[in-house]
Amino acid sequence: MPTSSQWLNDEQTPFLLIDEVRFARNVGRLATRINQLGCQLRPHLKTLRSVDAAKYILPNFHAPATVSTLAEAEAFAQAGCTDLLYAVGIVPAKLARVAELIHSGVKLHILLDTEAQAQAVIDYQKHHNVPFSVFIEIDCDDHRGGLAPQDPQILAIAQLLHDNQVALTGLMTHSGGSYNAHNSDEIRQAAEQECHAVKIAAQQLKAQGLTCPVLSVGSTPTAHFAEDLDGITEVRAGVYTTFDLVMYNLGVCQLNDIAMHVVTAVIGHNAAKNWLLVDAGWMALSRDRGTAKQHCDYGYGLVCDDMGQPLSGCHVTQVNQEHGVIELPDHLTVSQFPVGTQLRILPNHACATAAMHQSYTVLKADGSKAVWPRILGW
Amino acid sequence: MPTSSQWLNDEQTPFLLIDEVRFARNVGRLATRINQLGCQLRPHLKTLRSVDAAKYILPNFHAPATVSTLAEAEAFAQAGCTDLLYAVGIVPAKLARVAELIHSGVKLHILLDTEAQAQAVIDYQKHHNVPFSVFIEIDCDDHRGGLAPQDPQILAIAQLLHDNQVALTGLMTHSGGSYNAHNSDEIRQAAEQECHAVKIAAQQLKAQGLTCPVLSVGSTPTAHFAEDLDGITEVRAGVYTTFDLVMYNLGVCQLNDIAMHVVTAVIGHNAAKNWLLVDAGWMALSRDRGTAKQHCDYGYGLVCDDMGQPLSGCHVTQVNQEHGVIELPDHLTVSQFPVGTQLRILPNHACATAAMHQSYTVLKADGSKAVWPRILGW
């Protein structure tokens, strides 16, 4: 398994590097796990937003997937995907684009949690004769949006959709709170809470003779710690394909599972302060400080050598647009890192770091290079 | 002067909106100021990285400008720009691209602060017969890189370049520290410090019979508060064209000078908590928290109504990838903001927010629409 290759030295820095071996291993690990629990995976494609990456992540393009924008839905549909959940609350102004995708043959499911949204969907369906498919968002941990599992609004929305022949396909929840867990027990609890929330909501519907076929849960932490998915139809997760330092701090992966580095070059020294300056600022790394509140704060990323070996205690401590500052620990000195030296930075939050790049450079298992373009915009 | 227009309601959210009237006013304000001080402006184009924007910012495309990446240098050169300073420390691996631009007729100046970099430039020039033009970076406030004004390395580098027929064009400094100023007096002091630093360094060279024609200083705060630019050749500034909340907190602009909004739509409510959910997360706003350490912390941005009027006390308080949370102040309730309502967010840091978008939607002075593409990558 190569951790580097000659062509890497000739690439213009900074750039985002994906390690194919680690990436494929991460993808396989969760797929096997969810399969063994008797459940189906609906991977979230928002981390890399890449058709090339999706070829690894999805068993085939008719398999279910999740997206965070209509731009993704349109691009993945263009590439042949046929079962997509747009997992951000729908606004009426976006229904025309949804309708166009449905008319083209894509099962594109939309998400909502208010009667007003449901009414807008009903009105559009009536006027434009488009068979929408709806998920209702359930709130399992009071962290963002969605309806509490026993909120009577769930029933009201389901009844409204039913009475107007709009398909209620699923109930979905996302344990965003699991990112704040302190140990694996808390992640397991969060996983149980996700399942409990959608099951309680489904019972409420069933008691009124309303059904929906899909119960959807998931986040990368809970997907890796859930022990019982009985009664759950599908699990969603996104960042598990590359992992990152936030997931490492949560105990979901090892450092050498992280399949994403930003490759940078030393552009200067501040010898008096023992600082390296590198050409990866927040434009290449993102401004994400996801590890700031965790037990180990990696600044703007953990520094590795040009083979990807972490340099202990070596973090990117400051960033400007195109400058990063690495305050070296005492056992290292700037003279060990001449101007031009390549280093690799492990990201705090892979989704945020990937979002700063328009394409990814891939180190393939055979040492060769690939380039995966990212789907851009909204 | 329009603050909105009918077509805005039909745009797909989220998107980045530039107000042409404010933008042009900001550009004119600094140009006039620097002109009155008898100095030349070398605007930094890194905020918007847009050829269309540069048509407002530069008097003509032969005027001096600054860029933060070679991708910008190549795109602006392609558009006709002929005098560009690449203001990030050069690494040997990038010299071939620099040489190509110089051969095409562009005065592309490079930046360095070590003898090793100077030697790499000398070697490349010798082997490839390309007339490089060098700026040496001077550190005026101990905030990042560059050489202290009295550092003998400055002389050593200048002598090395001179002995090898590489043109030393300028000395440049940037008061990054001015962003941390607490009042206008501190910004004025930072401006004096910038000028002092390059003048001291220039005297050192002059004493040894070495000259360089350009003394370059600048940052948006110091450019707006400098009172005496005697002996200085040029001033650099970037974010002044749009401004942002960080600059507002510093007292460099008024709220109604900020020419950049992220336009977003309400996608849900959490009525119990009096929260709005909007479709501008960190993908549209960036993760920048530049106001966190200032006297007023705006979270991830100050919320305005659909006409751009700020809603006092109304900030984006949490962000996920495609979700923003607005915790409404007590005098507002979610029912005033139905799903689909458009809001506008003023950004903490315009450079970081612009970096999340591949093009900008422009509200022109006559109410019409323009689209400015952004130059992407490195």
Image (tube, coloured by chain):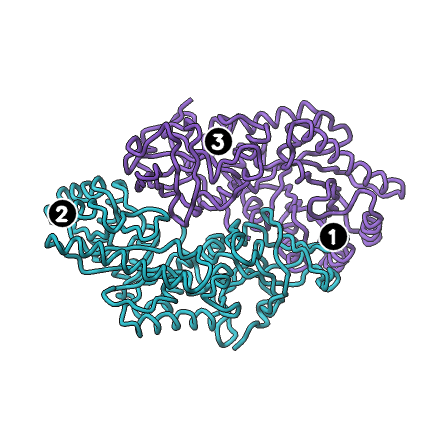
Chain colours: A cyan, B purple
Left or right: B170 as drawn, with respect to B82 = right
CB under 8 Å between discs 2 and 3: no
Across and down, in percent, residue A174 comes to 33, 55
Across and down, in percent, residue B269 comes to 31, 40
Q: Which circle marks residue B133 in the picture?
A: none
Q: Chain of mark 1?
A: A
The residue at which mark 3 appears reads as: B259
Name the residue rendered at 43%, 28% in the picture: B312
Name the residue rendered at 39%, 72% in the picture: A29
The residue at which mark 1 appears reads as: A273
Judged by depth in the image, the label closer to the viewer, 2 or 1, is 2
What's the amino acid at mark 1? Lys
- Give the quadrant of residue A105: bottom left
In space, the residues marked 1 and 3 are separated at their CA atoms by: 38 Å
Across and down, in percent, residue A304 comes to 60, 65
Q: Which circle marks residue A159 in the picture?
A: 2
Whether residue B63 is visible here, answered yes or no, is no
Judged by depth in the image, the label closer to the viewer, 2 or 3, is 2
What's the amino acid at mark 2? Gln
What's the amino acid at mark 3? Ala
User: How many labels were placed on the picture?
Assistant: 3
- Give the quadrant of residue B81: top right
